[in-house]
Image: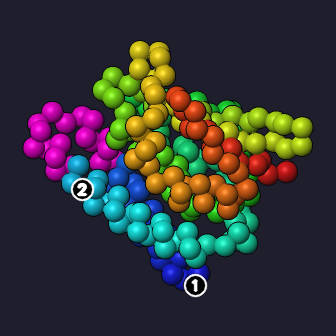
């Protein structure tokens, strides 16, 4: 079972990168013909990714989520160097590292899926803000990863965007990490317990 999950992860991680960079490429294209080609690539990758994710979600058990995962480093790695990021991708990370106990591969998939789906669906002239911060309640510290679209300094409504996302699988990944997803009209917040 673990070998199959490892193989599925090894296939899915490069697919996520292909999908992310294809969505970034699409934003820079002008010819409709080129845009359609990139969209076909993205649809094919998305379909393969969904099937593999479904397979992994059925195989992964809670006990597999045991490694220390540096969230800031994972997000920086996924988004690439800050000086090479596009103007429409704004990332606000704390100076210190934030660690949680979990499965880094699943978390990478979770973040890539949110980022690609939001970049693909965001209206022209919008920006995707990704914010990592620590919040505390009476008993626990949580790492909040906030995904928010803004257009001309106003938040973009998520109603239609969220409808196209594969939320059951994403929710399952967050639950495996003892976290939760909060959706409101203008943002998605993934909350995960901080490692103690």
* Magenta-drawn stretch, dominant element (helix, strand or loop): helix
Colour basis: rainbow
Secondary structure found at label 2: helix
The percent coordinates of residue 30 (x first, y second) are 15, 33
Q: Is residue 6 visible?
A: no
Label annotation for residue 41: 2
Residue 145 found in image quarter:
top right
The percent coordinates of residue 24 (x first, y second) are 32, 41
The percent coordinates of residue 124 (x first, y second) are 30, 26
The span shown in magenta is 21-38
Tell me the quadrant of the picture where the N terminus can be found. Answer: bottom right
Label whose residue precedes the other's in the sequence (2 or 1): 1
- Number of callouts: 2
Secondary structure found at label 1: loop
The residue shown at (85%, 51%) is: 196
Q: Is residue 39 left or right of residue 185?
A: left
The percent coordinates of residue 54 (x first, y second) are 48, 68
For disc 1, the marked residue is 1
Q: Is residue 22 visible?
A: yes
Crowding near the residue tagged with mark 2, few <14, some 14–19, many ≥20 C-alpha atoms within 10 Å: some
Q: Is the residue 18 above or below the residue 90 in the image?
A: below
């Amino acid at each position: 079972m673990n070998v199959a999950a490892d193989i599925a992860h090894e296939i899915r991680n490069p697919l996520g990168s292909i999908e992310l960079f294809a969505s970034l490429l699409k934003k820079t294209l002008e010819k409709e013909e080129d845009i359609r080609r990139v969209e076909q690539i993205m649809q094919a990758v998305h379909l393969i990714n969904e099937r593999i994710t479904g397979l992994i979600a059925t195989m992964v058990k809670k006990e597999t989520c045991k490694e220390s995962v540096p969230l800031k480093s994972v997000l920086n790695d996924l988004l690439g160097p800050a000086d090479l990021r596009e103007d429409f991708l704004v990332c606000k990370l704390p100076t210190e590292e934030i660690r949680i106990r979990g499965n880094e591969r699943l978390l990478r998939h979770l973040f890539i899926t949110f980022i690609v789906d939001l970049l693909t669906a965001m209206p022209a002239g919008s920006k995707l803000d990704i914010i990592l911060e620590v919040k505390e309640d009476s008993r626990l510290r949580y790492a909040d990863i906030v995904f928010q679209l803004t257009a001309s300094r106003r938040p973009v409504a998520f109603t239609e965007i969220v409808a196209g996302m594969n939320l059951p699988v994403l929710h399952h990944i967050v639950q495996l990490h003892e976290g939760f997803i909060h959706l409101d009209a203008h943002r998605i917040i993934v909350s995960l317990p901080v490692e103690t």
